């Protein structure tokens, strides 16, 4: 009975564990899952945590620091015997052994580099947060592309399988006609060539489908060979993403994450200039120290009879830079040069972002227009192929003309699927460059 209960418990645990990992994803569910589980996204989150710790590390250097120390000395060979100044039988100085416990408090009072360091820690944290946003945007785009590639492969496999079924039926019919002496052998051979070509495309697409699933699993943070199922269709996503409202969005690049990162770089270079300039200022620190000194010819420091001499002191340290042979000046000038480069990089980033936004909008608009054209082309290709097939079996059209019509149809099918994917991907590119994450 106990064994049965244990087995039921293990089954329930196993079932509960598998429920935590979804096996079916819509596109938005895949994006949400990846933002939590993608390895790059998780590491970007860890960078933020590390930046917070570094910020506190910088703050802590300016707060009171307390250190303790215990010094023990055993004079194996004494130069002179111990002296008892008080006549109480206890050695006051020159004993064979001595123990000195002490404690010291240090406090930084003024340091220009510390003040700059506080500002730098804040900027570094902001840089980490912006890097996280950038990473999430890239992860989102990668998931969209990978999700679309899987759907493209799935749709291609289905279309190719349907084409093969039609070709096999046609080949069977034309073979019977040929065997009855009513058609030429070339007609059979033309269909065989077409069928072989389509089968080869199907085999290749099946392999590409497996790779596409693996790429999607990696982007989601799943095991490479996880059995992932997609609930959206390529056509549905294409239709949803054809809304052109995003084309009217502002071209203000200052709100984009790439501009913010470039601006962070400029601010960090400004702080480096301040840091080098602050090194010319004096550094002031204070300290308080207290200690006890115990002397004895034998190790009896833990006895109640051990005499201890206490001492305490406080003071200040002032470090004043006087002459450095131009070292500080050279460092400051180098920091200013780096700042000038960062300012130019910011301007360059601004110009490139404007160009990227214009290009992304143009690509998205073209993708939508191209989808509409490819949809019409497929309808025409289907009608042409159907007419040629009818003519072929009626003996009006040649097998070569039928093969041309079939090839044209197959190309139109793939072009429409690719156009759907281009709509989805171009929309994702535009949203990424605009730092926009609209839930579709």
Image (cartoon, rainbow, N blue to C red):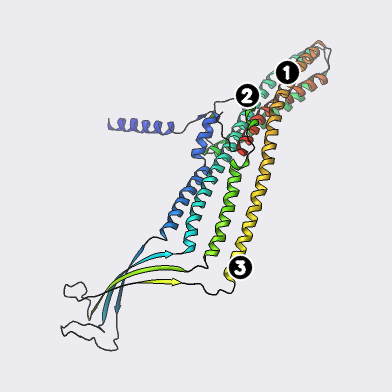
Q: Residues within 10 Å of mark 1 (few under 14, many from 20)?
A: few
- Residue assigned mark 2: 239
Q: CA distance from mark 3 to mark 2?
A: 60 Å
- Residue assigned mark 1: 379
Of mark 3 and mark 1, the one earlier in the sequence is 3
Q: Secondary structure at mark 2?
A: helix
Q: Position of residue 415 (x, y in %)?
A: 71, 27
As drawn, 244 above or below 280: above
Of mark 1 and mark 2, the one earlier in the sequence is 2
Work out whether residue 378 or residue 189 is closer to the camera in this orientation and state it: 378
Residue at the spot x=66%, y=52% of the render? Answer: 344
Q: Residue furthest top?
A: 394
Residue at the spot x=63%, y=33% of the render? Answer: 249
Residue 246 visible: yes
- Could you tell whether 388 is left or right of 436 in the image? right
Marks 3 & 1, CB-CB < 8 Å contact = no
Q: CA distance from mark 1 to mark 2?
A: 18 Å
As drawn, 131 above or below 328: above
Q: Position of residue 48 (x, y in %)?
A: 48, 48
Q: Position of residue 207 (x, y in %)?
A: 63, 33
């Amino acid at each position: 009975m106990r064994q049965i209960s244990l087995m039921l418990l293990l089954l329930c645990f196993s079932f509960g564990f598998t429920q935590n990992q979804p096996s079916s994803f819509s596109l938005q569910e895949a994006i949400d899952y990846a933002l939590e589980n993608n390895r790059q996204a998780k590491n970007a989150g860890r960078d933020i945590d590390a930046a917070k710790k570094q910020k506190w590390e910088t703050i802590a250097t300016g707060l009171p620091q307390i250190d303790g120390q215990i010094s023990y000395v055993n004079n194996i060979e004494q130069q002179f015997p111990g002296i008892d100044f008080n006549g109480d039988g206890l050695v006051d100085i020159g004993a064979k052994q001595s123990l000195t416990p002490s404690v010291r408090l240090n406090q930084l009072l003024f340091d220009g580099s510390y003040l700059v360091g506080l500002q730098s820690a804040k900027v570094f944290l902001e840089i980490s947060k912006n890097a996280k946003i950038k990473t999430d945007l890239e992860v989102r785009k990668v998931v969209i592309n990978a999700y679309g590639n899987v759907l493209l492969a799935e749709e291609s496999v289905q279309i190719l399988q349907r084409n093969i079924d039609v070709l096999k039926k046609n080949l069977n019919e034309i073979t019977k006609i040929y065997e009855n002496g009513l058609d030429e052998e070339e007609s059979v051979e033309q269909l065989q060539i077409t069928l072989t070509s389509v089968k080869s495309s199907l085999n290749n697409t099946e392999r590409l489908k497996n790779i596409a699933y693996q790429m999607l699993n990696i982007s989601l943070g799943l095991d490479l060979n996880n059995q992932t199922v997609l609930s959206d269709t390529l056509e549905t996503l294409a239709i949803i993403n054809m809304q052109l409202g995003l084309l009217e969005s502002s071209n203000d690049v200052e709100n984009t994450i790439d501009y913010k990162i470039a601006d962070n770089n400029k601010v960090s270079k400004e702080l480096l200039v301040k840091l080098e300039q602050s090194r010319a200022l004096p550094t002031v620190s204070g300290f308080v120290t207290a200690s006890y000194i115990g002397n004895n010819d034998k190790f009896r420091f833990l006895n109640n009879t051990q005499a201890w001499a206490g001492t305490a002191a406080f003071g200040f340290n002032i470090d004043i830079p006087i002459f450095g042979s131009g070292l500080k000046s050279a460092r400051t000038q180098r920091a200013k040069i780096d700042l000038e480069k960062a300012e130019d990089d910011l301007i360059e980033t601004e110009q490139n972002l404007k160009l990227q936004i214009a290009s992304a909008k143009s690509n998205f608009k073209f993708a939508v227009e191209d989808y509409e054209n490819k949809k019409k082309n497929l309808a025409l290709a289907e009608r042409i192929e159907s007419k040629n097939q009818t003519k072929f079996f009626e003996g009006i059209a040649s097998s070569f003309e039928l093969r041309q019509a079939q090839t044209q149809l197959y190309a139109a099918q793939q072009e429409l699927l690719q156009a759907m994917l281009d709509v989805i991907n171009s929309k994702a590119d535009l949203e990424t460059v605009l730092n926009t994450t609209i839930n579709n």
